[in-house]
Amino acid sequence: MGRRVVGQAVVAGLVGAVAGLGVRVVELGPPEAARRALFAVDQRWWRLYRRALVALGEDAGALDKDPPDPTHVERALTDLITSLTAEAASRTQKEGHMHRESDFTDPSPRRLGALALITDEFGDVLLVEKAYKSGPERFGLPGGCARPGEPLPTACAREVREETGLDIMPQRVLAVHQMPASGTATEGVNLVFDGGLVPRETALTLPPDELSGYQWCPVADLPDVVAPYMLWRITAALSALHGDPVRHLHGGPGELGRPAEKAS
């Protein structure tokens, strides 16, 4: 009885595996071995086997005419398992692995940025001016890249402290902005955290070799001060700060030809 139950389980599993691969039993070969295996394990399951075979595109009628010798069952199941394994290996090789070990041990380079949206009592946004950039791109939110293994909120607090002298406690994420690789930087994913409210009269300490200044920018003036991608980032973060859903942005506004997606 125990062997019969095991046999039934094996056959049911094989039928499920074949269906999951999206191929017909007859394509796996040897076709007679598959038919005999499905019929011989237990005829009481005949209706289930028959329905499964029909669903897979098999000619179930052949089993009615030529009942197999039960002594061939073990060999038939072995042949079928071998065929299934070979087919699965072939499909994996053709279609590629879902994941490879190197995806986890040696992934493609990608920066992780941790930025802070800090506002004052008037609702103006704190912008820092980068000494190594020019034009509208020199203005942006305080923050920077996380170090290997560093939690992003910790990275955000550290970068803000290094750039402004402020000690903040980053709160929830307000926006996720994925930036494609460019000629000067690898692909990056930037998280904008709620950096809280800081009184306008608070003195800031800037690193002179990295930042050349800062300003509290009214929201209405942002389009005239920052680059379009930074305006998109800050606007999305402000919207989330005021109760709208957190959004996932990619590149610059309109780059994907569709509205920004909600972050999951």
Image (cartoon, rainbow, N blue to C red):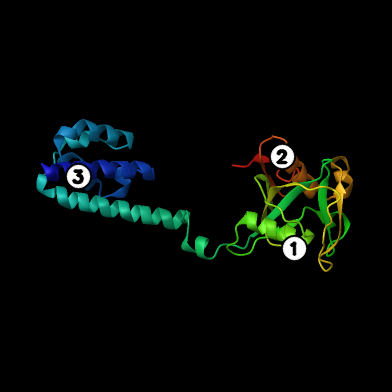
Query: Mark 3, residues whose alpha carbon is within 10 Å: few (<14), some, or many (≥20)?
Result: many
Q: Quadrant of the C terminus?
A: top right
Mark number displayed over residue 37: 3
Sooner in the amino-acid sequence: mark 3 or mark 1: 3
User: What amino acid does circle 2 point to?
Assistant: Leu
Sooner in the amino-acid sequence: mark 3 or mark 2: 3
User: What amino acid does circle 3 point to?
Assistant: Ala
Query: Mark 1, residues whose alpha carbon is within 10 Å: few (<14), some, or many (≥20)?
Result: some
Mark 2 residue element: helix
Mark number displayed over residue 241: 2
Q: Nearer the viewer, residue 203 or 221?
A: 203
Mark number displayed over residue 197: none
In three-dimensional space, the C-alpha distance between marks 1 and 2, rounded to whole angstroms, equals 24 Å
Label 1 vs label 2, nearer the camera: 1
> Residue visible at 12% across and 44% down?
2
> Residue visible at 15% across and 33% down?
44
Query: Mark 2, residues whose alpha carbon is within 10 Å: few (<14), some, or many (≥20)?
Result: some
> Residue visible at 11% across and 45% down?
70
Q: Quadrant of the N terminus?
A: top left
Q: Nearer the viewer, residue 199 or 46?
A: 199
Image x and y of residue 134, in percent? 87, 60
User: What amino acid does circle 1 point to?
Assistant: Glu
User: Is 135 left, or right, of 233 in this rendering?
Assistant: right
> Residue visible at 21% across and 49% down?
77
In three-dimensional space, the C-alpha distance between marks 3 and 1, rounded to whole angstroms, equals 70 Å
Image x and y of residue 14, in percent? 28, 45
Q: Is residue 259 visible to us here?
A: no
- Furthest toward the bottom, the residue is 209
Mark number displayed over residue 162: 1
Mark 1 residue element: helix
Image x and y of residue 109, in percent? 62, 63
